[in-house]
Amino acid sequence: MKPRHKKLVMIVSGVTALGVAAILVLNAFQSNLVFFFSPTQVIAKEAPIGKSFRIGGLVAEGSVKRDDGSTTVHFAVTDTAETIPVVYTGILPDLFREGKGVVAQGKISSEGIFVADEVLAKHDENYMPPEAADALEKAAKAQKASLTQ
C-alpha cells in the first residue's frame, strides 16, 4: 500500500471513530435529559407520554395522605391554576410540607396520576426552582386575566 493510501485510511478511520463517539455521547445525553412541566402544561397535554419528566409547584393544602404500613404517599401538586395528583413510594425530604414548593420526577400513569420516582423539596423559605416559580407566576397571571374577563 502506498503512503498516500495509508494516510487516507488513517484519516477516514479517525473521522469514523470521532463520528461514532459523538453519536454515543449525544445518545447518552438525550436519554438522561429530563424536562420540567407545570401542572397547567401537563393538563394541556404538553408533557411527554411514557417518558420521565419533572413536575413542580406547591403541595396542595389538605392533599397529603399516607398509606398505613407503607411509605407510599399520595399528594397533589398545584400551580394555583391546575392540580395534578401524585403518588410516591419512598422517604420524603424533611422539608416536604403542604403549601411548600416541590419538584417531583416521574411519569404520568394511564389514569392521569403522576407516579413519582423522586421528590425534591425546596431547601429554605426563599428558594424555589426557577421553572416552578415561572409556572406559578404564569398561572397567577392567567387566573387574574380570566377573572377580569
Image (tube, rainbow, N blue to C red):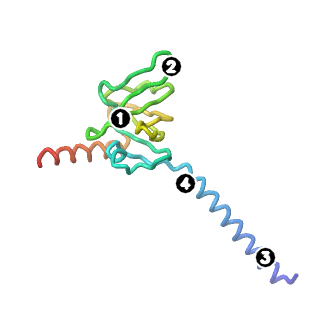
Q: Secondary structure at mark 2?
A: loop
Residue 22 x/y as whole percent: 63, 62
- Alpha carbons under labels 4 and 1: distance apart: 27 Å
The residue singled out by tag 3 in the image is 9
Kind of residue sitting beneath label 4: Gln
N-terminal label among 4 and 3 = 3
In this rendering, position of residue 133 left or right of residue 95: left
Most extreme residue toward the top is 69
Residue 89 x/y as whole percent: 50, 27
- Alpha carbons under labels 2 and 4: distance apart: 34 Å
Most extreme residue toward the left is 148
- Alpha carbons under labels 1 and 3: distance apart: 58 Å
The residue singled out by tag 1 in the image is 77
Q: Are marks 1 and 3 in contact (CB under 8 Å)?
A: no
As displayed, is residue 13 above or below residue 46? Answer: below
Dot 4 crowding, Cα within 10 Å, few <14, some 14–19, many 20+: few
N-terminal label among 3 and 2 = 3
N-terminal label among 2 and 4 = 4
Kind of residue sitting beneath label 3: Val
The residue singled out by tag 2 in the image is 70
- The residue mark sitting in front, 4 or 3, is 4
The residue singled out by tag 4 in the image is 30
Residue 115 x/y as whole percent: 46, 35
N-terminal label among 1 and 2 = 2
- The residue mark sitting in front, 4 or 1, is 1
Q: Secondary structure at mark 4?
A: helix
Dot 3 crowding, Cα within 10 Å, few <14, some 14–19, many 20+: few
- Alpha carbons under labels 1 and 2: distance apart: 21 Å
Q: Secondary structure at mark 1?
A: strand
Question: Which residue is drawn at the image coordinates 17% and 45% (left, top)?
Answer: 144
N-terminal label among 1 and 3 = 3
Kind of residue sitting beneath label 1: Val
